[in-house]
Amino acid sequence: MNFSTDMHLDQNYPLKALNTFGMDVYARYFVEPGCRDEILTLMNYRHMVRLPVLFLGGGSNVLLVNDFGGLVVKISSKGIDYRETGTGEVLVTAQAGEIWDDFVGYCIGQGWAGLENLSLIPGTAGAAPIQNIGAYGVEAGELIERVSAVEIKTGREFILTRSECRFGYRDSIFKQELRDRAIVLDVTFRLAKFRHNNPSPDKYDGGHDCVADPGPSAVKLRVDYGDLKRELQAMGIADPSPANIRDAVVRIRSRKLPDPALLGNAGSFFRNPVISDGVYEALRKMYPAVPGYPAFSGSASHSGERTTESGKSAVSIAENSVSENESSDSGRNYKIPAAWLIEQCGWKGYRCGDAGVYPNQPLVLVNYGKASGREIVDLAHQISESVFTKFGIVLESEVNVIE
Ligand SMILES: Cc1cc2nc3c(=O)[nH]c(=O)nc-3n(C[C@H](O)[C@H](O)[C@H](O)COP(=O)(O)OP(=O)(O)OC[C@H]3O[C@@H](n4cnc5c(N)ncnc54)[C@H](O)[C@@H]3O)c2cc1C
């Protein structure tokens, strides 16, 4: 195919290096648009060539189960622009193919606060709004001003504001109505400017060299998340800068999570289930140690509860059966750490062949080398079945499984 640009269409293209699970599968056709215009050009060809298409950023949230019989498009458009608002804030736009963590590092280097808690998340900027990436008390959606996208079917470009993106817990309109219908072209974040005394932006090294440049809606640094707070304390930092927070997050993540370059994985395989307070209370009666945190986003449509055929709450049929009458919902929801549920079912550190559960974090499924996508899917299925049998809670996959 001739795209009349610099894009090449490859055939039978290996995807092993393009997905962090390291699945050794092939794409029938492969193309890598390197800029926004090339993505738009490609949309025109999509109308003529009706192949199934898979868009990939960094491949860090996908599990490729089989060779892909259609066209894989790896989005590699780069570029960062910004505009100061004059009110202590800055609007920063990243093209979809920007490497997320490089972008976070760039923003902190510029003295712009907001994204530091999201340091070291693999992948691209364009994928950040898809599942509303989140870590250490912050979700990308809180900072996103707008997302510019293109409709695959028509090639029509459009812009969505933050509220139109309908961000929820690991969720957005791009995983709902716009799933497989739109490509994110760029993402604009509203960040807060920080003044700092250190003239070299790459060399933040203390807790006192940055102060918020006062603006009407300056982003507050978020250090209330337990692990983060403890790490900063251990680092001896009482009044952290964004760079200090980034350092702390990098330290925690490097300890807890496997590096995909060394051990194939896609981060958390399951979302933390969100259940109603009634179900949570019933669960606590059976398992007093069950942790739970009030869920502030993405609640209603993401309940981890499954209704049985008889219409009873799943919890009522779980081990040590809880009566529904014992629960009284007040409309509040709780997020339960899926890692705890999985660990209680004895999966932590489990390994079968090359598919396994990461010993330091049971929410992460790993490929020790030659596991197939099917083996990982089977393991995930066994885990979620055992969690349902024991707790009556349904685990949903956070990773996009591409069959
Ligand atoms: C070690 C590790 C740690 C992780 N930690 C976290 C974490 O703390 N928090 C968190 O939220 N996630 C985490 N993740 C998951 C993952 O990094 C994020 O979901 C990330 O945003 C995925 O980006 P990507 O570019 O790799 O997307 P891909 O895996 O390439 O794609 C993911 C999905 O988005 C679609 N997509 C990609 N780009 C576009 C685009 N431009 N337009 C439309 N659709 C697109 C794909 O088709 C696919 O359905 C982690 C993953 C790993 C491996």
Image (cartoon, helix red, strand yellow):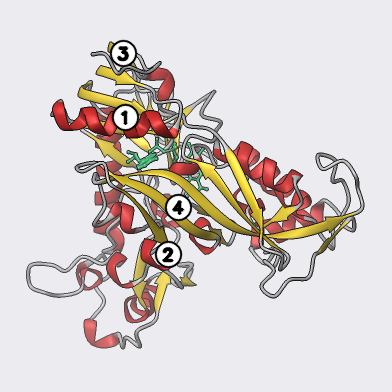
Marks 1 and 4, the one that precedes in the sequence = 1
Foreground mark, 1 or 2, reads: 1
Q: Disc 2 residue type?
A: Ile
Label 2 residue near ligand 1, CB within 8 Å = no
Q: Where residue 104 sits in the image (x, y, percent)?
A: 63, 44
Q: Where residue 123 sits in the image (x, y, percent)?
A: 49, 37
Mark drawn on residue 339: 4
| Visible residue check, residue 182 | yes
Foreground mark, 3 or 1, reads: 1
Q: Disc 4 residue type?
A: Ala
| Visible residue check, residue 369 | no
Q: Where residue 54 sits in the image (x, y, percent)?
A: 27, 32
Residue at horizontal 71 percent and vertical 68 percent from the top:
87
Marks 4 and 3, the one that precedes in the sequence = 3
Q: CA distance from mark 1 to mark 4?
A: 43 Å
Q: CA distance from mark 4 to mark 2?
A: 9 Å
Q: CA distance from mark 1 to mark 2?
A: 44 Å
Query: Which residue is denoted by mark 3 in the rendering?
Result: 13
Query: Which residue is denoted by mark 1 in the rendering?
Result: 41
